[in-house]
Image (cartoon, coloured by chain):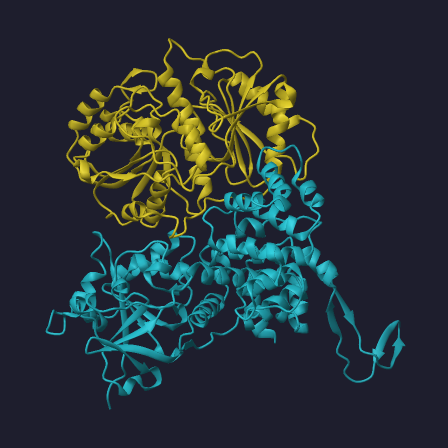
Amino acid sequence: MASKNRWFMPTNTDNLRMIIAQGLISSPNGFKKYYADVLELFPGYIPLFRNRVQADILSSVTSEVEGLTPCIIEFDIKKIEGLAKTISDSQLVDVCLKDIDKENSDLLLLLAPIPLSCISKVIFKTIADKKAFDDDAELYSNVPINTLKLHYTKIDQKLFEAKPDMTDYLISKLKSMDFNLTNIIDYNKIYAFGGMLANMFYFSKNGTKSNEAFLSCSLDKKVLDNDDYSYIINYFDGSKKLDSGNPLYNSIVDIAVKSKDFKEEIIEFLESDSKTLNIANKLKSFEAISDKPVSEEFSEAKTLLGKVLLMLFHRENTEALMEYSLDIFTEEDYLTFAVIFGIRDKFIKVPKFVREFRDLQNFISVKMANYAHENLNSQIKFKESRQPLTIMNMLKNDRFKGYFAKELKIENCFQTVIPKSDYHVVKGKPIFEGIVMPKFEILEDKYFKFISTQISTDYNKYLDKYNRVK
Amino acid sequence: MSKRKFKLPGVDDLNKSQDRVLRLPENGQFLIVGGPGTGKSVVALLRAVKFAKNKNYIFLTFNHVLVSATSQLVDTRLQTLTLSSWFYKLQYQLTREYMPQRANYKPDYDEVIKRFESLEPQERTLHIIIDEGQDMPVKFYESLITCGYENFFIVADQNQQITEENSSRQELTDILGLDVEDVIELTENFRNDYPIALFANEFFTDPSSPAPELPSPQRELGVPILYEYNHYEDCVKLILREFDRDDKNLVGVVVANDDLRDTYASALETMEINLDNPRAIVSTYSGKDKTSVSIDFSEGGIVVLNDKSIKGLEFDMVFIVIDGFKIYNNDMDSMKKRFYVISSRAMKKLVLFKSRGYSDGVEKILPNNENILIRKRLNNG
């Protein structure tokens, strides 16, 4: 029986860190910082090599500067459906991924991007390289290793020892090929979508409305409400025309997706129209030295849009937003802030503790990759990753409710309802016939007032508890 | 009060030069140079965190305030001391004699070198990580090399020399035995917003090197302001109000002398004012205090310091009270150097105050361009 095919992509550990941080294996134009490697040889594609990596390809991944460390990403291509390409007689030809084992191709080209969930392991040349990568990940705020398998074995070390042979003229062959793609991915938009989804997941703790918005958006990138946040979210729904929502919101979201300096560009935009000039002036005076308390500024904002813009000027990033609360904010306010902050900051700036919530990183990575491929109209789809359970969905379980209320000392945010049933009183105690299960219900207003001021870092602990009691 | 922590950088926040620094091998001699806000201290701190597991390192900074700030802001417990106190301890441990001095707290390095030369030759593997390395004289390094130390990681900026005895970039390069191309330059300003960096560059004095690169993108929001005031209480009120906008912020108030330091610290603590958040924790320290630094850098608050103690620190906002700063003997360059260090401590906002009628000369070095420094009266002062 033939041994199982393995599919590899070599790179260097600096790019690998960036891949983890951005949440996708992308083309070089999807990297904010990129070191020359094999990806630039195949513009728009992710090249996978079968069972071995040729010597010249391997040496190219550490060629840019001294000191780069090579590594090899191994893929689980069973998580990918559809058509890929291979090179035959210097031409790109289609291959069906489900038949790939029957094909004789040593090189597979997948349209970029690919989600992190398709990485089965990362192979290192030495055990010291593996340890250094693992240790160094702690020096960065956005390289959570999570479930990524870091791997070293003597057998796989041989992958790094390929000797040049007759087939090693691939690089020169590739340079003469035309990889021009007609559809170019707008990576800013993809990462903005991922940032938004991650923030919505975090803020789904706040109540039913936030929870339903996350669930609906993660299902088909839209929400059906007519609230301000729905105008923003529906920006990503390809089935709608951009001007069908709220034009002002669309422009703000557009700037949030594309801008390098949001504050400066939003002021410029608002100043360009006499109808929004007063909003621009208000934001400029908010940004300057002001004698007015911030709470007063928010109280005076007449619309949610006004509050959203103030918040975008007031808090630097999502983490700072999470730490900020005012009594006057509603659940809808927080949800709208979360959505627009996620878009402005992108997936790469999602706080590390959120990315460490179990299943979240891979779930969003797949969502971003599938969204990118929908935009490309490609024939590739990635197997959905397990959807992380929201706190609000966990709270549908009565036993978990009891635990959660006690753990956070918020029993006053719940009430107990005894089902209608006959009972009699003995020594002052009501006695019911048979088994009567009380129901715990959330008092949403009280619960929201509490939970919206809390930073929830203990998601994994709650999930463990939920899995035990459900 | 909100907790604040040193924020580890994102992998995308570091540029390729900083990546190169993080990839440097453990052993050897390394010199990293760069202007304020270019992330020199960040890479030095990350290197210390990296070494924290094996413990064979020491992270040295120039002053007590910086030692305190560094220790508090990272989760990892670091082995950190001031350059001077570590050197005094080391000299005593190795020679069992008190430090030979030319004057109070001024070691006689020639004598120290003689003493170290007489020691048994020994390989010393300690990794010495030094922040603000330009503030020690070259003989300090010579002493350490004489007694066998080999592993140096020094970050420095010769434009931020605030001591009389210091080392230039060339001297540091030579003493470490490096070639010019071995020195790693960090040029991108990560700390200051564009208008603050533009303002700080007005005080750049080094004729032998270009002024540091300005951060991008270029922006107009947040141009530093010079307020002229009648009553200092108005300045205090403004500082409290600004802090109240985000109680996680660390606000630096820089003054010229200890009298002003006491005045501002006391008024900031006691002034009655309606605020959104609980009152700011106000702390202060002077090198003349014979007590340890009691500033809590792990929480938002207001820190009142003189310019010697502010070195190496960074604040979300900096307020400079220019009353009391005096230019002696028409030495503009020294004052420019001081203002270069002070103003580049601010990340997001920079405000200067001067009393009405102040005329001790510092205004001569302040830019007149309204795009670089806005001048206003405080409460019609």
Up the image or down, A120 lies above or below A244; here it is below
Give me the chain that's cyan: A
Q: Residue at x 63, y 40 (%)?
A: A282
Q: Which quadrant holds residue B182?
A: top left
Q: Nearer the viewer, residue A219 or B178?
A: A219
Up the image or down, A291 lies above or below A413; here it is above
Residue A463's spot in the image, x, y percent?
A: 56, 68
Q: Residue at x 30, y 77 (%)?
A: A85
Give me the chain that's yellow: B
Q: Residue at x 22, y 52 (%)?
A: A65
Residue A105: tell me if it is visible.
yes
Q: Please give left or right for residue A441 compared with residue B294 in the image.
A: right
Residue B305's spot in the image, x, y percent?
A: 49, 25
Up the image or down, A297 lies above or below B160; here it is below
Q: Nearer the viewer, residue A272 or B25?
A: A272
Q: Please give left or right for residue B38 compared with residue A389 in the image.
A: left
